[in-house]
């Protein structure tokens, strides 16, 4: 364990008595842990633990039972109170026995390397270390783990867009955009640039084949690289990167000698380039015969090295990208203006706690989460408390604005903490990992595990890296394992993980397994394999996930579902999610899916009874953000299956009392959801009574889709949906098949693999669905793909409810081809659309005219079966607007032997030459005009089923529908109905003598049987009105009839020839609106669910060293606004943040300096014309003063002379 600063710090933990194992740094094989400082009550007052006089120094032999300080690879057992005051040698293990304490001294910069740390409490019997595995910190029964790092803000949001650099805008030269990009790009060796540092001009570029794979080319590369390096003029900048592979089998010592001569003017024999192995990434930057040379070596992936030439305001960068995927292997070089390479970020929170050298990550604000960029904080004297300067040449734009109440401001997350826990890994994937076919790097990291019965766990302000194991389940950075309830009376201070940074994890970030009541708050999770925040078995209740962010959640292999990872994998509805961000994954941001009953180790523990989760409402979902996910922003669907995969529909139907089958439904509220830039869809929500409210959607192929798992209605209210916003992202490249060329859009597209994919905002599917008070904008169709604010589930074989409706809609554009499209649905002649059963029945009602401009219109497909002369066809919608109420005639085959062998077809009596044919095997829903003005007959493609049902969905009082049904002319039949009247047998029905009598009947329960035509006529009606509060398909049960043929020849199912003509019957949008301020999620930070916290200053830091050794310098000290940090809109600290005072005011010594030499004197002849000359100088330029040194050197010089002139 090691701390980043040798700085005393005391954090308070209330009511702690003899804590066991006060955090340990371990560098598990090698596993690095950091400093823990803890305050415990001692004699009635709070003391830092290192101040406890009972502590014995680790460094003293007398502190140990055997009177010897633990040596290399020792297994250390701590039974007393030990103060770690030195860095010990590498240890095998540390076991903290019950009653023992290990406390860090803040007065030493300590590094502890240990394979595992086991913190024990009171004895519970024999303990099996293999249960924890290798490389771990384990907190066992009765154990305590307290880690309290320096308080720093975990993450914030941009308050201003950070534009990317590009040629002509900060970039002087970029290799990938130059004509040199394709030069010898397949060579394996070194790519070298020569650059003029004053102008930034490229003077030469060469690639030398050196790997040994191709002998002829390798020999040529070895011959030519030497003269090339030797010819480089002094002062030139040299940028080098390994391309594909530098060394495969060749001995390159002579090449390394040359590079060292160029870099250091001598052969050192130990430079990093000599350590480069096959397929290592490596980069060098240097200036010929100058004092500086920088390099970076990385096993696989990326090596990047940069140099800032302050004299010429230029930054040079060399990159080497090595990957198993060919197109991800390349070199790159940049020459950038320094002013653009060190940008100042404007953010919304006080980030003065972020210090020079801290690492941060800027999330992608585009579809591709790999546009997240890491940077280093650098000094910034001119920055305000809400600004931070970073070392980064932004290759991507990071958006920093709210667009029409859609908060697209990118997040900036802190990765650096002063307490670090790190698992050391090998520089390659060892074969015994068993997964090298999936990962070309070592995935065997460390893990921290909390077992049932621990006494206390509170971890905050720690940094975890290279943690988790992808080699086997059960090894995660943070892992609560079968601890049951950690928030009951046994835990007066509930367990929490807070303000931690977990990055480069090999398996998840936080795992909650068989544990209830854990609080996970304000953590950062960046780059993990598999689900990031993970509820494992589906029995984990009352988890709080508040203010966490997950970035770059990648595919894993531990469970089947890790192939489709979610940043937040929520398997129990009794979970609170608020203020979280899912900023990019290989699949989904937030995924709710529940098992029928808990699986795995939680099975039979009765955490949740069978199907209890299915009927339990989600506790809270508030102010969560999901963007840059490859599939879904939010997904509420599927079940957690026994094999830990996901599948089936969720059948989610929350009720007031989940264990009571007759309980009333309970509404689930999804509030202030913000989703944007998710490739396939922003949100897919399947379930019962669910309302999405005050939410914001933008930039996705599908904005929001509700799906039905049971007959409950769903709602979207007070929300905003945008099609394509000003946040254009990186332009999508696509292949134009007609021109056989690659082309580029002017923006990023959500489905880059299908450039003609439609973009739809609110999508009707299943239902009933209601959209109320929704504002739409930016849905302008272009030449490549259709766009519409409202659409329907495409290629849909299922059915939409006819009573789904809209009201209170507003649009930010005038409807028309040149400005935008309100509504659209295509057919099989258009890309991405079809003519399946559900497509044909696409419809919704416009209750108040806000969608169509005429209240009460029904939007339907434009075919003759759906429309009449009273309907209007809207060409740019490809839909018809009809002044009728539509319902659905739902036909369902009951007789098993007829399912799949015959299909229904429906005819409207006023257009008998047209029929509606549906392909469903046993259930079909036909659009039907209600109100008695139109009627229908039902026929079959083959035989008439022996038993079938007909439902009148959407039927209400005053809006019946009559249907005639083909039966055998000699049929003996029975009728059964439970609505609107209970009529279990035919004798309970009334037979009337004509169609007219049936049409005029208002009592219900009547039928007309035309035996000669083989047609049975029934009128489906309701006695109940549809009032505004009725949102189901019918007010109560929909009318239905079951027809059962007892006898008769059923072969002839199509009786149109006898039905007609006998029963034939005769038969511009504007408005541009502004968004309402209260619609949509709006700003997602500060968190409205938390009270504002005003900032307060911490203690003054130590005075700095004097800026001058003499002559009057200054010393400074500063204090941070971190006690507490202002958050959630709290006020910033008011007062002086830094102080200066004078120092070293004494006069500086003035060392003496020589004057110029006097002229040589005349020759002084000594003998035979031979003599000497002399010249003098004085130590007076300047004279030594104030203790300055006298000149070093002679005051007189003499030389020989000849003079025979006398």
Image: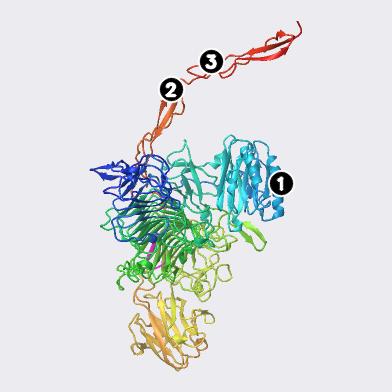
Q: Is residue 201 above or below residue 808?
A: above
Q: Is residue 793 above or below residue 479?
A: below
Q: Residues within 10 Å of mark 1 (few under 14, many from 20)?
A: few
Q: Residues within 10 Å of mark 3 (few under 14, many from 20)?
A: some
116 or 993, nearer to the observer: 116
**Is residue 169 among what the camera can see?**
no
Return the x and y of residue 165 as percentages of the image width and height.
57, 46
Residue at mark 1? 224
Return the x and y of residue 1203 as percentages of the image width and height.
74, 10
Q: Residues within 10 Å of mark 2 (few under 14, many from 20)?
A: few
Return the x and y of residue 931 as percentages of the image width and height.
42, 76
Q: Is label 1 in a helix, a strand or a loop?
A: helix
In the rendered image, which quarter contains the C terminus? top right
Residue at mark 3? 1183
Outermost residue, left direction?
44
Q: Earlier in the sequence, mark 3 or mark 1?
A: 1
Q: Are marks 3 and 1 in contact (CB under 8 Å)?
A: no
- The residue segment tinted magenta is 685-693
Q: Does residue 689 belong to the magenta stretch?
A: yes
639 or 404, nearer to the observer: 639
Mark 3–mark 1 distance (CA, rounded to whole Å)? 57 Å
């Amino acid at each position: 364990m090691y701390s980043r600063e040798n700085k005393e710090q005391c954090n308070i933990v209330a009511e702690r008595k003899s804590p066991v194992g006060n955090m340990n740094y371990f560098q598990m094989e090698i596993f690095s842990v950091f400093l823990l400082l803890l305050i415990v009550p001692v004699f009635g007052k709070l003391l830092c633990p290192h101040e406890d006089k009972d502590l014995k120094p680790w460094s003293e032999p007398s502190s140990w039972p055997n009177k010897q300080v633990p040596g290399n690879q020792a297994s250390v057992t701590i039974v007393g109170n030990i103060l770690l005051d030195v860095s010990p040698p590498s240890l095998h293990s540390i076991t903290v026995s019950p009653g023992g304490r290990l406390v860090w001294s803040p007065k030493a910069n300590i590094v502890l390397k240990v394979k595992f740390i086991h913190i024990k409490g009171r004895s519970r019997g024999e303990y099996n270390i293999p249960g924890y595995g290798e490389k771990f910190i384990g907190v066992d029964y009765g154990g305590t783990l307290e880690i309290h790092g320096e308080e720093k803000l975990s993450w914030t949001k941009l308050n201003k867009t950070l534009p990317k650099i590009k040629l002509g805008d900060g970039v002087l030269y970029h290799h990938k955009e130059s004509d040199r990009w394709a030069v010898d790009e397949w060579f394996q060796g070194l790519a070298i640039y020569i650059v003029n540092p004053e102008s930034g001009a490229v003077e030469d570029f060469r690639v030398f084949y050196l790997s040994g794979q191709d002998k002829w080319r390798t020999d040529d590369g070895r011959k030519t690289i030497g003269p090339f390096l030797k010819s480089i003029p002094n002062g030139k900048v040299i940028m080098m990167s390994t391309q594909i592979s530098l060394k495969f089998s060749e001995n390159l010592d002579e090449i390394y000698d040359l590079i060292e001569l160029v870099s250091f003017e001598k052969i050192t024999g130990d430079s990093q380039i000599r350590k480069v192995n096959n397929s290592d990434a490596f980069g060098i930057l240097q200036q010929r015969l100058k004092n500086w040379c920088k390099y970076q070596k990385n096993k696989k992936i990326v090596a990047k090295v940069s140099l800032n030439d302050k004299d010429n305001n230029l930054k040079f960068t060399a990159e080497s990208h090595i990957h198993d995927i060919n197109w991800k292997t390349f070199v790159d070089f940049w020459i950038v203006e320094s002013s653009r390479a060190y940008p100042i970020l404007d953010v919304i929170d006080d980030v003065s706690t972020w210090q020079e050298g801290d690492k941060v990550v800027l999330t992608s604000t585009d579809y591709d989460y790999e546009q997240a960029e890491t940077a280093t904080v650098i000094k910034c004297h001119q920055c305000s408390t809400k600004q931070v300067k970073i070392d980064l040449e932004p290759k991507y734009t990071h958006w920093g604005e709210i667009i029409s109440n859609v908060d697209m401001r990118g997040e900036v997350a802190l990765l650096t903490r002063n307490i670090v826990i790190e698992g050391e890994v090998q520089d390659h994937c060892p074969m015994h990992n068993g997964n090298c076919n999936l990962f070309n790097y070592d995935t065997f990291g460390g893990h921290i595990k909390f077992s049932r019965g621990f006494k206390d766990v509170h971890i905050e302000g720690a940094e975890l890296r290279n943690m988790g194991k992808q080699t086997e389940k059960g090894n995660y950075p943070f892992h609560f394992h079968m601890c049951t309830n950690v928030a009951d009376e046994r835990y007066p201070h509930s367990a929490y993980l807070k303000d931690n940074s977990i990055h480069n994890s090999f398996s998840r970030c936080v795992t909650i397994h068989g544990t209830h009541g854990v609080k996970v708050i304000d953590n950062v999770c960046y780059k993990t394999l598999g689900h990031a925040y993970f509820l494992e078995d589906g029995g984990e209740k009352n988890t709080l996930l508040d203010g966490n962010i997950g970035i770059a959640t990648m595919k894993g292999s531990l469970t089947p579902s890790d192939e489709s990872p979610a940043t937040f994998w929520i398997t129990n509805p009794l979970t609170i999610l608020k203020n979280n961000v899912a900023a990019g994954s290989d699949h989904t941001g937030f995924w709710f899916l529940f098992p029928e009953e808990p699986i795995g180790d939680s099975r039979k523990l009765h955490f949740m009874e069978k199907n209890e989760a299915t009927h339990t409402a989600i506790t809270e979902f508030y102010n969560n953000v999901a963007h840059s996910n490859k599939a879904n922003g939010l997904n509420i669907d599927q079940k957690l299956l026994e094999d830990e995969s996901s599948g089936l529909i969720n059948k989610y139907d929350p009720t007031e009392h989940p264990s009571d089958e007759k309980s009333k439904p309970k509404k689930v509220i999804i509030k202030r959801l913000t989703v944007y830039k998710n490739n396939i869809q922003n949100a897919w929500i399947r379930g019962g009574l669910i309302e999405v409210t005050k939410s914001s959607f933008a930039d996705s192929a599908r904005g929001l889709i509700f799906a039905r798992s049971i007959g409950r209605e769903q709602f979207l209210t007070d929300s905003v949906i945008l099609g394509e916003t000003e946040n254009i992202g990186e332009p999508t490249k696509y292949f134009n098949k007609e021109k056989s060329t690659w082309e580029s859009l002017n923006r990023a597209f959500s489905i880059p693999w299908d450039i003609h994919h439609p973009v739809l905002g609110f999508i009707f599917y299943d239902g009933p669905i209601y959209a109320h008070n929704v504002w739409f904008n930016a849905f302008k169709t272009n030449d490549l793909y259709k766009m519409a604010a409202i659409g329907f589930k495409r290629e849909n074989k299922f059915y939409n409810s006819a009573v789904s409706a809209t009201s209170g809609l507003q649009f930010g554009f005038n409807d028309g081809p040149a400005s935008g499209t309100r509504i659209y649905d295509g057919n099989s002649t258009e890309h991405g659309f079809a003519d399946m059963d559900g497509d044909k029945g696409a419809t919704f009602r416009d209750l108040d005219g806000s969608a169509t401009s005429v209240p009460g219109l029904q939007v339907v497909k434009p075919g003759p079966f759906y429309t009449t002369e009273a309907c209007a066809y809207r060409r740019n919608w490809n839909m018809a607007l009809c002044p009728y109420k539509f319902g659905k005639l739902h036909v369902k085959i009951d007789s098993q032997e007829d399912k799949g062998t015959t299909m229904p077809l429906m005819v409207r009596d006023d257009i008998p030459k047209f029929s509606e044919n549906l392909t469903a095997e046993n259930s079909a829903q036909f659009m039907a005009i209600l109100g008695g003005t139109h009627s229908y007959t039902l026929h079959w493609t083959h035989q008439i089923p022996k038993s079938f049902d007909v439902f009148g969905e959407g039927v209400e009082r005053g809006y019946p529908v009559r249907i005639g049904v083909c039966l055998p002319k000699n049929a003996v039949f029975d009728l059964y109905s439970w609505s609107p009247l209970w009529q279990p047998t035919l004798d309970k029905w009334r037979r009337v003598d004509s169609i007219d009598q049936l049409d005029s009947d208002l009592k219900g329960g009547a039928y007309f049987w035309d035996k000669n035509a083989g047609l049975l006529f029934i009128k489906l009606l309701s006695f109940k009105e549809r009032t505004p509060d009725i949102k189901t398909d019918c007010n109560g049960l929909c009318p239905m009839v079951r027809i059962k043929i007892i006898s008769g020849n059923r072969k002839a199912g199509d009786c149109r020839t006898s039905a007609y003509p006998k029963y034939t019957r005769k038969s511009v949008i504007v408005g541009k609106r502004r968004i309402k301020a209260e619609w949509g999620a709006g700003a997602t930070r500060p968190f409205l669910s938390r009270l504002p916290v005003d900032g307060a200053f911490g203690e003054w830091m130590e005075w700095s060293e004097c800026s001058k050794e003499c002559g009057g310098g200054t010393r400074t000290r500063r204090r941070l606004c971190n006690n507490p940090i202002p958050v959630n809109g709290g006020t910033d600290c008011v007062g002086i943040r830094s102080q200066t005072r004078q120092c070293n005011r004494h006069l500086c010594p003035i060392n003496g300096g020589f004057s110029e030499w006097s002229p040589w004197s005349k020759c002084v002849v000594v003998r035979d014309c031979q003599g000497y000359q002399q010249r003098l100088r004085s130590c007076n330029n300047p004279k030594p003063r104030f203790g300055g040194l006298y000149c070093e050197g002679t005051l007189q010089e003499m030389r020989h002379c000849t003079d025979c002139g006398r």
